[in-house]
Amino acid sequence: MSVLTDLIYTGSNAVAGLTEGAVNDAIARYGADQSISFGDTAYFLPTIYAATGVKVKTLGDLTACITVLKSLISNKEELGEALNAGLATAVGAEILEALKYVEDAEPYANETGIGFVGDPVIRSLGVPLVTGDIPGVAVIVGKAENPADAVKIVKDYQSKGIMSFLVGDIIDQVIDGGVKTGLELRVIPLGHDVTAVTHVVTVAIRAALIFGGVEPGNLAALLEYTKQRVPAFVNTFGPLNEVVVSAGAGAIALGFPVLTDIDLAENQVPGALESMTDHAEIVKKSLELRNIKIKVTEIPIPVAFAAAFEGEIIRRNDMHAEMSSHKNTTCEVVMMRQKDDIEDRRFTLEGPDIDGEGVVELPLACVVEVAGDKMQEDFESVIERKIHTWYNYMEGVMHTGQRNQFRIRVSKDAYEAGLRLKDFMEVLYDMIMNDFDTVVDKCQITFYTDKEKAAKILETVAMPKYNARDERLESLSDETVDEFYTCILCQSFAPAHCCVVTPERLGLCGAVSWLDAKATKELDPAGPCQIISKEGCLDEVKGIYPDADRMINEATHGALEHVTLYSLLEDPMTSCGCFECICGIMPEANGVVICNREFKGMTPTGMTFGELASMTGGGVQTPGFMGHGRHFISSKKFIKAEGGIERIVWMPKELKEDVAPRLNKTAKEMFGIDNFTDMICDETIASDSEAVLEFLTAKGHPALSMPEIM
C-alpha cells in the first residue's frame, strides 16, 4: 500500500471509529428518537441524503448510516477505493457536526466560524455563480507557517471574486491580518475543527440537488455534477495528519482538486493532488487546476474593485462621507445623446469633493451621458441599474437604492487610501465601456454636489426622464410587445432549465427584466437571451405559445417540451433554484401561499421555504409549485390561468409590505378591490391553516368563493 492510500485509510478508519462512538454515546444520552437536524435546510443531513436517499431525522437513523460509512472503507490499495474512503470521512464529518446541533441549537454562536450554511444562502448564491461574479470556490484548511502569506492569498482570491471558506487556525490568521469576514464579503470562516469542512461539502452537494435536479441516492450523478459544475478546489496549509488527508480524498472524489504547501514528492496525483510550496504561486495554480478563467477589470482607483465587496456594510462609526436622499438631493440618471453632443471620457465635478474633517455630507446628482450607433433609449435604465452594483464593487463603498432615492457611504479607510469622487466617475466610465461596449461608443459623466445645482438637475433633468420612462414601462405589457426572450444564464448550474422573460414576468431570480433581456440580445446576439416569437398563440389565458415550446425544447436539449407562462398547474415554468420566492397551493383555502427565501418560519402549508423550494428546481416541472421573482407577484399575469392574484391568501409580513403598493394597484385595476393586501394573512396573524381560514373568512377573501383551484 502506498504512503498516500495508507494515510487516507488511517484517517478514514479513525473518523469511522470516532463517529460510531459519538453516535452510540448520543443515543445513550438522548435516546434513539431524539431528532437531529442542521436546521434551515430541506435536505436532512445533506451528504447522506444526496448519496443514499436516506432521510436522517433521529439519532436512531444514524445506526444504518454508520454501516454505510464503514462499507466505503475497503482498505484496498487502488486509489479509487481510497477516494471512496475519503467519502466515508465526509459522511463521518457530517454526522459529527450534526451531533453538535443536538447538544446545542447554536453551537457556533460563540465561535468565529458560522458552521452550517442554510439553503436560502445557497439559493442566493445562484445568480453570482452563474454570472461569473463568483467564478470559483476556495476551501482553505489548516494554518500557514507565515500568517502574512495566508492573508495575501485570501485577499488575492477576494480580489478575483473567488468565495473562500476557511477551516482551522487560518481563520484567526486571516482575521488578525485585518481581513473582514462574512458571507456578504465572500470570506467565510466555518469552524476550527477539521470536521467543519463538511459545511462547504454540503454546499456543493445541495447545489446538485437544488440546481441540478440530481435525485437523492444517485451517487454517480451527484459526483458527476459536483465535478463538472461546482468550481471548487482545496488549499491546505501546514502539516498533514491522517484525517486531513482523508478529508482531502473526499474532496478529490467530489471533483475538487487539492493543492497543499507540503512537498508530497512521488505521492502527488496530477490534476487532483499536487504540491505548491511557493505561496506566491498558490492562487494561480489553484485556478489552473480547476480551469477557472478570471476576467479582471483593472480600474485605476486607490481601493480594490471586485464583486466580493458587494455586500460590504459601512457602519456610521466607520464612515467618512455620505450622500443620502434622507438628508440631501440625490439622483442617478443615464441619458442617451448624439455623438457630437458629448465628449468621451469627460469627467466634471460641479461642487465640493468629499474632503473634510468628520463626516462629510453632500448632495449628489449623477448624470451619465452615453452615445452610440446601436444605443437605444430603452437601454438607459438597464445601464442605470448597474450603477448600484458597480459602486458596491469598490472596497469601502456602500450603495443602496436607486434613481433619486439612494445612499452612498464611503469608509474612513477608503478615504484615507485616496478615494475621491473622480474615482466613482472612473468606475462608471470603465464599466460602461467594458460591459456595454457594443452599444456605447462615447460616455461623459458629470457629478453635481453643489446644493442648488443638484436640486436643479433633479427637477429639470432626472425627474422628467424618470417620469417618461415610467410611462413607457407602464405601456409595456405582454400584449404590446412583439417578442419574448429566453434566458439560460443559469444553465451552467441547471442544465434543464430555461426562463421565458416577458414584460410582465421577470426572470425568477428577479435580476433579468424584459428590457434587460432585450439589451443582452443586442449586446451578445448569440448569448443567453434569444427571441421567442409570439405568433400563433394557442391560449392567451394559460400563455401557450408554440415558439416558446420550440425554443425551450431547444435550449434544454430536449429535457422540456411544453411550458405555459401563466399557469401554476399545467406545465408551469421550470426553476433553476435561485428564485426569490416560491408559490404553493393551500387547498383548504382554495388559494396559494407565497414565501420568500428570507423567511425562516413555517407557512400554512406545513412547510418552510426550504421545504417548499425543494419541491421544484433543477429544471423540473412540479404542478402546484412555482419559483418566481418578487416583482411577478403584482403582475396581471400571475397564475392567470388559476384566477390570478385573487388566489393569494398568505405571505410573510415583510414580503407583503414590500409588494403592497404594486399588488394593491393591480387588485384595484383588475377586480376593483381596495387595499387587497389587508385581506392577505401573514405570520403575525396566523400560520396554522385553521386560523388562516378564520382570518380569510372574516375578511371575505375572494379566494374562498372562487371555483376550486384543484
Image: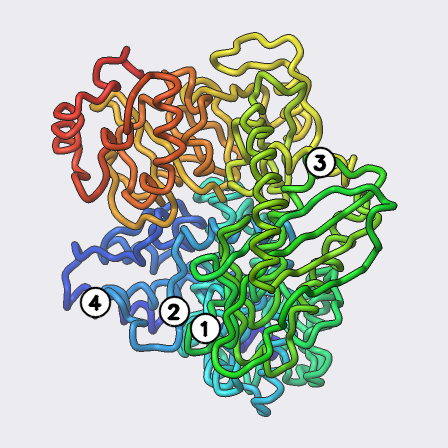
Q: Residue at left 74%, top 42%?
A: 336
Where's residue 273, x and y in %?
65, 71
Q: In the image, is 66 to the left or to the right of 526?
A: left
Q: Residues within 10 Å of mark 1 (few under 14, many from 20)?
A: many
Work out whether mark 2 precedes mark 4 in sequence or the reverse, and give the earlier one.
Answer: 4
Instruction: Give the SS element for disc 4.
Output: helix
The residue that label 2 is drawn on is 114
Of the numbered discs in the image, which one, if any, rests on residue 377? 3
Seen from the viewer's position, the closer of residues 203 and 112 is: 112
Q: Amino acid at mark 3?
A: Glu
Where's residue 505, x and y in %?
52, 29
Seen from the viewer's position, the closer of residues 635 and 107 is: 635
Where's residue 675, x and y in %?
28, 29
The vertical placement of 646 against 338, above or below, is: above
The residue that label 4 is drawn on is 26
> Does the rendering let one see residue 103?
yes
